[in-house]
Amino acid sequence: MKRAEIKRRPMADTTLSSLEPEEKTYREHDGQGLYFRVKPSGQKLWELRYSKPGSKARSWLGLGPYPSVGGALARTKAQEARTLIAQGIDPSTQRKAVEAEEKAQSENLFELLAREWYATRKAGWGDGYAKRVIGALELHVFPRMGNRPYADITPMEWMELFRSMEKKGILDQMGNVRRFCKEIYDLARVTGRAINNPVDGLDKFLQKKQSTNYAHVEQVQLPALLRAISAYNNRTVRIGLRLLVINGLRPSEVREARWSEIDLDKAIWEIPAERMKKRRAHIVPLSTQSVALLKELQLYSGSYDLLFPGRNDRTKPLSNMVFNMALRRMGYEGMQTGHGFRHIASTILRENDFPKDHVEAQLSHAEEGVARIYNKATYLEQRRTMMQWYADYLAALERGNVVQFDKRA
């Protein structure tokens, strides 16, 4: 339809849709300063011609493209703009202010802040832990808080989120998520994007999981367990379990170990900070039994980076359930876990009068907030003597002999 054929105004939608483009852009007046603009490309838009409040200057205000904005909607938008003008408000200025506010809101969403925090922290974490952190946020937090401006979320709303996790009985996960969220707000605060931390202090009013020891056998049952481990039919898992038993390490510290951490000549195992729970490097003195086990293990995995490479992907360690599954197959399900060997080591060493500081250093249990700087080699020589005694003690238990600690050593 040619614009010369327009018979009435305001224009009907049939007219608007059939108007043909010309070589140059043209506008057709719909009424009361509302114009319908047609470009040579065929694109059609609505525009309002108006005078700025308190000025004779004239300006254009875009009201949207056609057909997304039909005739009726365009006239409603035009009337809303005229109402603002009558109140002394420039609709173009107000629109820019609203767009700026919306942009600011979209940039201040909690999920964006959380992912920024995650990006700054994950470099110091192991891959497995990093996946668990972002996975917990994606599962428990982002669905409810992710699209909210973080400054608008109140302490009560956070409390409701954490209590919903309490009701599910996932207290460990709730405690971790609360800690992550507190750190996320701390990032906003120290970078000048927030004044208060709405998560701070909520832990006082939330449940805490009662501390429990990982399952472990009584000492009278230990000789039989040691013999079962020595008889286990998977040679690499058997070696991993024995290293776990005689060194007091966490399962992940053994399972994810790399040959680059081991110095067999010096009989030390230096675990880098990113693999340690407390994120600080830790030196483990190796007993003669540990050195022998590692030399045996070299025959099986010495050509790989990892001590315990996965069966399908040699660049990844064995499953995090490998040691507990082995104990289950031996008949110790619910009685002994890989982590429980740390409790056994702590108990036996303390009962045999080894100093608490030496035992805690071996277990990498240095307390938070201590005045001294943590030393990865703390009590190294004393621990070397202690852990050689412990390896000998366990070997004697397995054979059925009794070993007494020579305090003069």
Image (cartoon, helix red, strand yellow):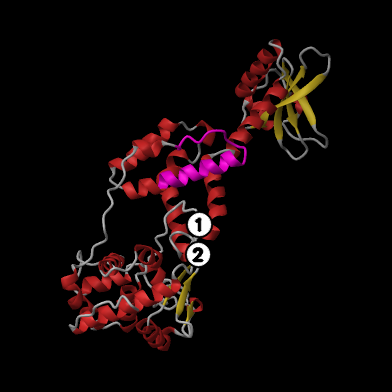
Q: Do the residues labelled 1 and 2 touch (CB within 8 Å)?
A: yes
Q: Is residue 11 magenta?
A: no
In this rendering, the answer to whether 376 lies above or below 64 is below
Q: How crowded is mark 2: few (under 14 residues within 10 Å), some or many (20 or more)?
A: some
Quadrant location of the C terminus in the rendered image: bottom left
- The residue where tag 2 is placed is 375
Between residue 251 and residue 262, name the one nearer to us: 262
Depth-wise, is mark 1 or mark 2 nearer the camera?
A: 1
Residue type at mark 1: give it: Arg
Range of magenta residues: 177-200
Residue type at mark 2: give it: Asn
- Tell me residue 177's x, y (percent): 41, 46
Between residue 91 and residue 207, name the one nearer to us: 207
Between residue 265 and residue 75, name the one nearer to us: 265
Q: Is residue 368 left or right of residue 221?
A: right
Q: Is residue 189 magenta?
A: yes
Tell me the CA gap for discs 1 and 2.
9 Å
Quadrant location of the N terminus in the rendered image: top right
- Tell me residue 217's x, y (percent): 20, 67
- Tell me residue 153's x, y (percent): 48, 33
Query: Is residue 11 visible in the rendered structure shown here?
Result: yes
- The residue where tag 1 is placed is 372
- Tell me residue 208's x, y (percent): 31, 44
